[in-house]
Amino acid sequence: MQDNIEIRNPATGAVAATLPSSTTVELENTLSLLKQGQRDWAKVPLQDRLECIIQFGQLILANKQELSEILTNETGKPITQSLNEINGAQNRIEHLRKNATKWLSEEVVVSEGATLENIRYEPLGVIANISAWNFPYNVGFNVFLYALVAGNAVLYKPSEFATLTGLQFAKYLYQAGIPENVFHCIVGDGRIGEHILSLPLDGYFFTGSYKTGLHIATTVAHKLVPVQLELGGKDPLYVADDVADIKQAAVSAAEGAFYNNGQSCCAVERIYVSALIYDRFVEAFIEEVASYRVGDPMDVDTFIGPLTRAEQLVVLEDQVKDALQKGARLRLGGHVLEGKGYYYAPTVFDHCDHRMALMCDETFGPLIGIQKVSSDEEAIGLMQDTAYGLTAAVFSSDRDRAMRILDQMDTGTVYWNCCDRVSPNVPWSGRRNSGLGSTLSAQGIRAFVQPKAYHLRP
Ligand code: TXE
């Protein structure tokens, strides 16, 4: 029996497409094709594999208008942000173009004496990429493009909330010269995802929730193959009293919290502000958020569209209710918006503290809590009071002061006077409940290969 998956437009709730879900039999047949395809793909010279990826990038750019509309229709991401994502994800391709040869080529470590010693970097084989909907270009490219360049085949399962975009990736990869038995896009939800876990793959690369990530890591642990998890966070931002421009700090913090409706793994999820500038910061922050245009995601001026998943509205309602009960002050929003679609009003609370769920549990929506602090030490303690470890940010005009705080953060990324930012030049990694392993940078290139040591006596 074959299930269908329904793709809904979050702006209206209407069904935009119905697709047959992949079956377990198809999945098993696909895997044997990928196993064969991978062996040939690994023999293709690195430069030729890279050329395919560069060509893919050009095809994506040439079709970005249509692709951005597909993304907006299935995720509700405002069209300007869909275009930004498509343009921005090209930097992964540029990073590979400049660095793949350096990090994937054979290394001659000892070239003199009786025994020569070299390292070759071999692909892992056929890897699974189980992916997310919030930034399908960014988080997808971080895995499947890097895996393909390194000579792997990829079984790609986009989120059921970004299926149409995932199918477009397959179409343009094939057009760019990637063989059909080297990349395959699976259609379906967590049930087909679960079946992927039972198959003999050579690595599992996941982006999504902590709960599913933990389930995947424990289920496949016995295979002893590489597992990487890119999970969520509860990322703090601290605004120190010496910040150079309070208004500018408020504008940047608000963008970090509300871009893509707060549905970013590294969105600012809680804000701590020095008591000395608290009132001025909060006023500027509210003024900025109140100016956001909420509406039809197809409108180029919209900054806040609908949430991608209707279920998340309940999470937001619960966090709002809890914050109100525990004494937080509602300054903006705080309710579902009337009418069609999964809209939630941009919401700001101040006078928050860590008894409240909105300061401790992942929100993943247009809702933020602000808490007053009286010292750097208090801020440090609160910032570290979390099981997550993705990013942490400090806004201050004093670099030494900011670095002293950032050095104490147990997170994969730290920001000084910026936030909610990813660059292919540096590793993207989460600690503890935020994940395992790194993508991007040299580490992210090497994540898709295994070293083989050669001891050679001529
Ligand atoms: O995630 P899931 P969802 C967080 C965020 C969000 C929540 C839920 O808090 O509200 O996760 O989002 C597949 N075996 N993030 O439901 O369930 C699933 O089909 C194998 C943070 O999208 O983790 C999809 O392809 N696969 C995050 C993928 O896992 C399974 C980005 C992610 O789904 C599976 C997105 C199973 N048993 C959400 N169950 C970030 N890091 O930014 C589901 N899947």
Image: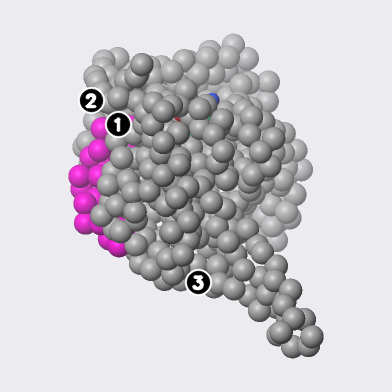
Q: Are discs 2 and 1 less than 8 Å apart at CB?
A: yes
Amino acid at the residue labelled 3:
Thr
Q: CA distance from mark 2 to mark 1?
A: 8 Å
Q: Quadrant of residue 50?
A: bottom left
> For residue 74, which numbered disc appears in the image?
1
Q: Is residue 383 visible?
A: no
10 Å neighbourhood of mark 2: few (<14), some, or many (≥20)?
A: few
- First along the sequence among labels 2 and 1: 2
At which x and y percent is residue 42? 48, 61
At which x and y percent is residue 297? 26, 34
Amino acid at the residue labelled 2:
Ala
Residue on which the image places disc 3? 101
Q: Quadrant of residue 374?
A: top right
Q: Secondary structure at mark 3?
A: helix
User: What's the magenta region?
Assistant: 55-80
On the rendered structure, is 276 left or right of 20?
right
Residue on which the image places disc 2? 16
Q: Main secondary structure of the magenta part?
A: helix
Task: Name the residue furthest right.
Answer: 114
